[in-house]
Image (tube, rainbow, N blue to C red):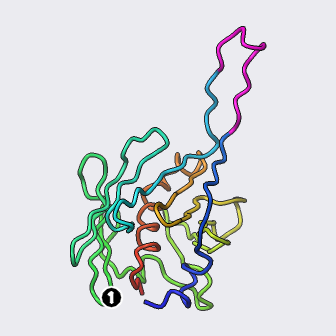
């Protein structure tokens, strides 16, 4: 696949880790124990031991595995920690995705590309969103502009990919759909 014309691959290169963690300040010069500060975002890593997102584990900062991505010659399955399938991608000439809450449909319909080829759409809880390349990242935004900032950020380097979700987006349920999108975007396969 020629990735130079795919707007969701443009700009990929070496990216450094971009942790947006808040700093903890010890109270009263060490007289009291330091309170652990909650991060403002959750960062998940796609550990690509074989150099491909199509066979990897997805872990959080606590090294707990949340998902496994397993691929054979025709199918990629994204498995939850429990072993239950979250989504399955069948790599036909026109790939098809299905899963819990995802009716079987072409991947080009699941993440439709815009007419100007600068973004991909996504529906979540009945509301439209857009995945848009920004530098070395692919970011998820709402389409109506009612919320500022990103709902999810996908980045990649040679050995891993990361998914960053602000806490409100994680709590709203964007985690699974963002993992599925990351696998599709970074698969290196034609999803149209």
**Residue at the limit of the structure toward the right, as seen here:** 28
Image: 62 above or below 162: above
Magenta part, dominant SS: loop
Give the residues in magenta.
Answer: 22-34
Asked whether 32 falls inside the magenta stretch, the response is: yes
Residue 74, percent across and down?
Answer: 22, 78
Asked whether 28 falls inside the magenta stretch, the response is: yes
Q: Residue at x 26, y 69 (%)?
A: 71
Residue 158, percent across and down?
Answer: 49, 67
Badge 1 is on which residue?
94
Q: Quadrant of the C terminus?
A: bottom left
Image: 94 above or below 139: below
Image: 42 above or below 127: above
Q: Quadrant of the N terminus?
A: bottom left
Q: Residue at x 39, y 67 (%)?
A: 51
Image: 127 above or below 39: below
Q: Residue at x 62, y 74 (%)?
A: 133
> Would you say 137 lies left or right of 29 here?
left
Q: Residue at x 46, y 45 (%)?
A: 60
Residue 182, percent across and down?
Answer: 46, 66
Count the labels in the image: 1
**Residue at the limit of the structure toward the top, as seen here:** 31
Query: Between residues 79 and 71, which one lies in front from this camera angle?
Result: 71
Dot 1 falls on a residue whose secondary structure is loop
Query: Between residues 97 and 83, which one lies in front from this camera angle?
Result: 83
Q: Residues within 10 Å of mark 1 (few under 14, many from 20)?
A: few
> Would you say 156 lies left or right of 18 here?
left
Residue 130, percent across and down?
Answer: 59, 72
């Amino acid at each position: 696949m020629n990735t130079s014309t795919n707007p969701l691959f443009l700009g990929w290169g070496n990216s450094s880790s971009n942790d947006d963690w808040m700093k903890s300040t010890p109270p009263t010069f060490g007289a009291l124990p330091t309170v652990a500060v909650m991060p403002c975002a959750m960062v998940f890593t796609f550990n690509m031991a074989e150099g491909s997102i199509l066979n990897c584990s997805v872990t959080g900062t606590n090294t707990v595995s949340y998902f496994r991505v397993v691929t054979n010659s025709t199918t990629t399955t994204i498995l939850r920690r429990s072993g239950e399938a979250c989504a399955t991608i069948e790599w036909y000439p026109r790939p098809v995705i299905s899963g819990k809450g995802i009716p079987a449909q072409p991947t080009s319909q699941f993440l439709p590309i815009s007419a100007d080829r600068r973004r991909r759409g996504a529906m979540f809880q009945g509301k439209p969103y857009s995945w848009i390349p920004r530098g070395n990242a692919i970011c998820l935004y709402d389409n109506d502009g009612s919320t500022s900032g990103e709902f999810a950020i996908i980045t990649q380097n040679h050995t891993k990919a990361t998914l960053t979700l602000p806490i409100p987006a994680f709590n709203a349920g964007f985690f699974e759909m963002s993992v599925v999108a990351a696998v599709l975007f970074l698969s290196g396969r034609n999803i149209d």
